[in-house]
Amino acid sequence: MPRLPISSLLFPLTVIACLAILLPASAGAFDLMSPAFKDGGKIPTEFARPGAGGQNVSPPLKWSGAPEGTRSFALTVVDIHPVANNWTHWLVINIPAKTASIPEGASGKNMPPGAVEFKNSFRTPGWGGPQPPRGTGPHTYVFTVYALDTDKLDLRPDAKPADFEKARKGKVLGQASTRGTYEQ
């Protein structure tokens, strides 16, 4: 068997050493999921608004693998169907960094300390569940949690999604999303 010169091993070893330095040991993926539905699956009816047959209960959410340096989280839920035109169903900021989940039914009742819920596109505070217009097919709801490098975003109580977009600019360390669908 021929012997390889040591110089032929230097490049691969150098690449491995650089990756070991650059990538943190716990470099896991930042992930968001709901125990209530699979990614891309149907959102159970109980989470929909009464007009769509539901009880408007906010779904449970869990996340893991937040980037190092995360000081708070923010959460959005947006219906991206063309008819909905990015309808906001939930906007929450200032979720403490130690938080890794929001329990079912937490909106308006049991949110993490310091978390602030804003009015949704229905013009009610907190969670506004799915209620797509009948006959428009399945709507996709994108749940996104943002890891932020700041303890607090300062937004007026009447803040809109555009205000949130502006306030978080340059402060996002990472984001994780999951999707659910609903149809009437």
Image (cartoon, rainbow, N blue to C red):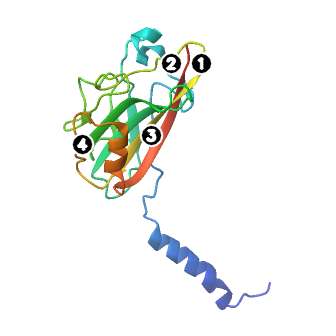
Q: Nearer the viewer, residue 30 or 16?
A: 30
List the residue tagged with mark 4: 155
Which tag, 1 or 3, sits closer to the chain's start?
A: 3
Looking at the image, is mark 4 or mark 1 earlier in the sequence? Answer: 1
Q: Considering the numbered disc 4 on the image, is that residue within a helix, a strand or a loop?
A: loop
Circles 2, 1 touching at the beta carbon (< 8 Å): yes
Quadrant occupied by the C terminus: top right
Residue under numbered circle 2: 132
Q: Residue at x 32, y 21 (%)?
A: 105
Disc 2 to disc 1, C-alpha distance: 7 Å
Q: Quadrant of residue 51?
A: top left
82 left or right of 44 in image: right
| Mark nearer the N terminus (3 vs 4) | 3
Residue type pointed to by label 1: Thr
Q: Residues within 10 Å of mark 1 (few under 14, many from 20)?
A: few
Label 4 Cα neighbours within 10 Å, binned few <14 / some 14-19 / many ≥20: some
Relative depth, front residue between 32 and 172: 172
User: How far is mark 2 from mark 3, CA to CA?
Assistant: 24 Å
- The amino acid marked with disc number 4 is Leu
**x, y percentage for residue 9?**
64, 84
The residue under the point 38% across, 26% down is 121
